[in-house]
Image (cartoon, rainbow, N blue to C red):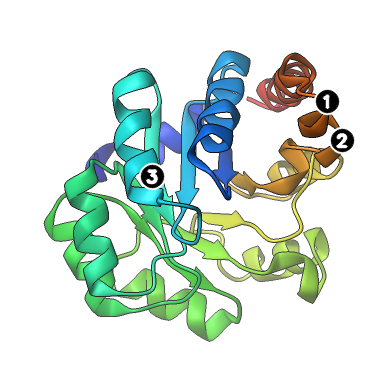
């Protein structure tokens, strides 16, 4: 997977981030995304029983790539690997975690914000770097400013990316984008309207595909 990661991202620009407080909700979120055509699904480490959810989704959604996010420790990463993750995200950069993931042929996308952090993570071998939290430092404008001197580093902005501005981030040069809560509006979840959640995401994918 490590050697194919960039090509996977170039074909699948959207990473759906699931953060849930129960397993059933997480499963519904993931299946709604898969039904829309999303192939990259991340389960955050601070979700309810994330390892069990990851393992379940690997079985139930074989056409999707299932990853883990919010990885903060060696132990959690080890357990996530055992659960079957195919990629992983951290909110920070830890060279030891990066080395462990890559040893198991699993792409790790470390979080970084400043030019120094981004360059350091990339020079340690990260195939892609997560720019987080992007909205707090200027959003699309910040991404453009970072990529001006660093066009060779594939960046994935998260933290403030939503359906309304997702296309702008790809136009600005992001290799992919991570969306979380905006994919799952509270009112639609309360109404159990998963079809509309799927429809909204499918429309976003169609708009992203126009940029290919």
Give the mark nearest the N terminus, 3 or 2.
3
Residue appearing at x 26%, y 71% in the figure? 97
Tag 3 residue: 67
Residue appearing at x 57%, y 17% in the figure? 37
73, above or below 104, in the image: below
- Gap between marks 3 and 2, in whole Å? 26 Å
Tag 2 residue: 187
Left or right side of 210 for 59 = left
Q: Which mark is residue 191?
A: 1
Q: Residues within 10 Å of mark 2 (few under 14, many from 20)?
A: few
- What secondary structure is marked by label 1? loop
Judged by depth in the image, the label closer to the viewer, 3 or 2, is: 2
Q: Are marks 1 and 3 in contact (CB under 8 Å)?
A: no
- Gap between marks 1 and 3, in whole Å? 28 Å
Residue appearing at x 76%, y 58% in the figure? 160
Residue 64: x, y in percent?
Answer: 40, 25
Left or right side of 184 for 37 = left
Left or right side of 66 for 210 = right
Whether residue 23 can be seen here: yes
Q: Are marks 2 and 1 in contact (CB under 8 Å)?
A: yes
Quarter location, residue 102: bottom left
Residue 155: x, y in percent?
Answer: 55, 57
Whether residue 176 can be seen here: no
Q: Are marks 3 and 2 in contact (CB under 8 Å)?
A: no
- Seen as rendered, the residue at the extreme left is 103
- Gap between marks 2 and 1, in whole Å? 6 Å
Front position in the image: 75 or 4: 75
């Amino acid at each position: 997977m490590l050697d194919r990661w960039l090509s996977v991202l170039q074909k699948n620009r959207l990473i759906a981030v699931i953060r849930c407080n129960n397993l059933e909700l997480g499963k519904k979120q993931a299946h709604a995304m898969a039904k829309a055509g999303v192939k990259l699904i991340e389960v955050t480490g601070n979700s309810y029983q994330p390892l069990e959810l990851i393992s379940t989704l690997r079985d139930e959604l074989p056409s999707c790539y299932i990853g883990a996010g919010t990885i903060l420790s060696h132990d959690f990463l080890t357990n996530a690997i055992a659960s079957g993750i195919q990629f992983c995200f951290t909110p920070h950069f830890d060279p030891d975690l990066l080395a462990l993931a890559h040893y198991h042929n699993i792409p790790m996308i470390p979080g970084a914000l400043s030019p120094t952090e981004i360059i350091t993570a990339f020079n340690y071998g990260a195939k892609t770097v997560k720019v987080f939290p992007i909205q707090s430092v200027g959003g699309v404008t910040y991404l453009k400013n970072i990529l001006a001197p660093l066009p060779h580093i594939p960046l994935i902005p998260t933290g403030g990316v939503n359906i309304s501005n997702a296309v702008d981030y790809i136009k600005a040069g992001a290799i992919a984008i991570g969306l979380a809560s905006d994919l799952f509006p509270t009112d639609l979840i309360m109404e159990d309207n998963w079809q509309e959640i799927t429809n909204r995401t499918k429309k976003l994918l169609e708009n992203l595909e126009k940029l290919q």
